[in-house]
Amino acid sequence: SLSDRLTAALANLRSKGVLTASDVDGTVREIRRALLDADVNLDVVKQFTANVRERALGADINKALNPAQQVVQIVNDELIGILGGEQRRLEFAKQPPTVIMLAGLQGAGKTTLAGKLAKWLENDGHTPLLVAADLQRPNAVQQLQVVGEQAGATVFAPEPGNGVGDPVRVAKDAVRFARDKQHDVVIIDTAGRLGVDQELMKQAANIRKATDPDEVLFVIDAMIGQDAVATAKAFQEGVDFTGVVLTKLDGDARGGAALSVASVTGRPIVFASTGEKLEDFEPFHPDRMASRILDLGDILTLIEQAQATFDEQEAMELAEKIATSQFTLDDFLKQMQQLRNRGGLMKMIGMLPGARQMREQLDQFDEREIVRTEAIIQSMTPAERQNPKLLNGSRRLRIARGSGMTVTDVNQLVQRFDQAAKMMKTVARGGVPQIPGMGPV
Ligand code: GDP
């Protein structure tokens, strides 16, 4: 994957005391190949590698870092740059309702996104209205109604059966309806086609003209690879848009779309969609995406999601523990118990350092492990759970007997706990975990 390749390219530098031009060129060549293989647009790759090369060879470098760290920092900066730099927030109208129009190919995830946006806005105190202006695809209206119901949002749709086929009219009526009924945001779902086509563009452009939206979000499936750039350009010419939403980032997209679209269109990525469920959705942070691509982990998002997913108090405590490195066997057990009821954990792990390896482990994770861990930890005294160093040979034997396990099981558990604790410490120390052998960035 892109992440592996970039990490490997950068890791090659770690033994160097001084960087020569040929070291830099070698690394830049590897980065270039990795990006191209990940379907990043050629123009974007050229610009990116030229910038990295120039800065890595330039005098304007931070003398406090070793050469490898400097290059990692430069690559990270440049990645953030092509992903749009600063986080771009949704623009709201001064005079409600705020009108948000969604455009994109069929299957990009517009209807799903409409529901996600509605829910997200509701959580923030808004009263969104969903508008079914996709009158092309059979069932599109019904699908939006289902999504709306899940999100608890009102859906504005033409009366079924009376043959009104004019999406522009529906969109216009919806904005008026929203004004009358005090909906402060209008989300218009438009029709997509399997490929870019002129009629589709014209329709979307007409809806845009008729409703004068505050935001036109171009929705694109991150899995479509090289086609992303051509599609985005076609929509930019045909309809134009104010921001991009990347969907299906949970799939094994090679990252090329994310890295190309913002840069090629000059339009920022506003949201990221990471699954089929309504809560699989988040504002897009270029810096976090960059560190995810470099597999440096993403502690901020992790803590934010932990806050949303778990009890907030508990998340604060965990964050505090990470910060102060007081991670105990009780915490370890709690984390493991969360494995039982949280499919979302997989996603959180995606943001941790060494994500891939952990995901694989999680794939192989045996639920019975939780039961065994519970049995062992519950056989320990509270003092031992706080401080596993108290666990000497005879205590381990007693615990093994008490829990119906073997001493080897107990030893393995303690070992796994030590590893987890070490990782927590890395996170706490630098904020950003290190690529093995390279030191914190
Ligand atoms: P539309 O034609 O643009 O309205 O696309 P839909 O909203 O109908 O989505 C097409 C398919 O993609 C549906 O099966 C969705 O469940 C799925 N989908 C949408 N967003 C995501 C996402 O972020 N991740 C995954 N894995 N699937 C998604």
Image: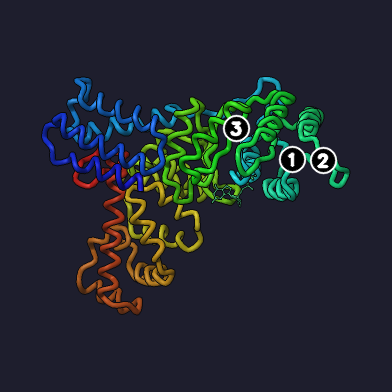
Q: Describe residue 329's horizontal placement relative to residue 203 as left or right.
A: left
Q: Which mark is residue 158?
A: 2
Write down the quadrant of residue 258 in the picture.
top left
Residue identified by numbered label 1: 132
State the SS at label 2. loop
Give 389 or 363, whichever is nearer the viewer.
363
The residues bearing labels 1 and 2 have C-alpha atoms spaced at a distance of 8 Å
- Asked whether 201 or 240 is in front, the reply is 201
**Which percent across, then down, holds residue 280?**
55, 47
Instruction: Point out residue 230 in the picture as x, y percentages from the top left corner.
Output: 51, 34
Characterize the local packing of mark 1: few (<14), some (14-19) or many (20 or more) Cα atoms within 10 angstroms: many
User: Where's the C terminus, which quadrant?
Assistant: top left
Report the residue that reaches farthest toward the left: 17
| Farthest-out residue, front | 198
User: Between 342 and 394, which is closer to the camera in this rendering?
Assistant: 342
Amino acid found under the numbered disc labelled 3: Leu
Q: Residue at x 23, y 61 (%)?
A: 389
Q: Position of residue 383 (x, y in %)?
A: 30, 61
Instruction: Name the mark on residue 160.
Output: none
In the rendered image, which residue does mark 3 sit on? 217
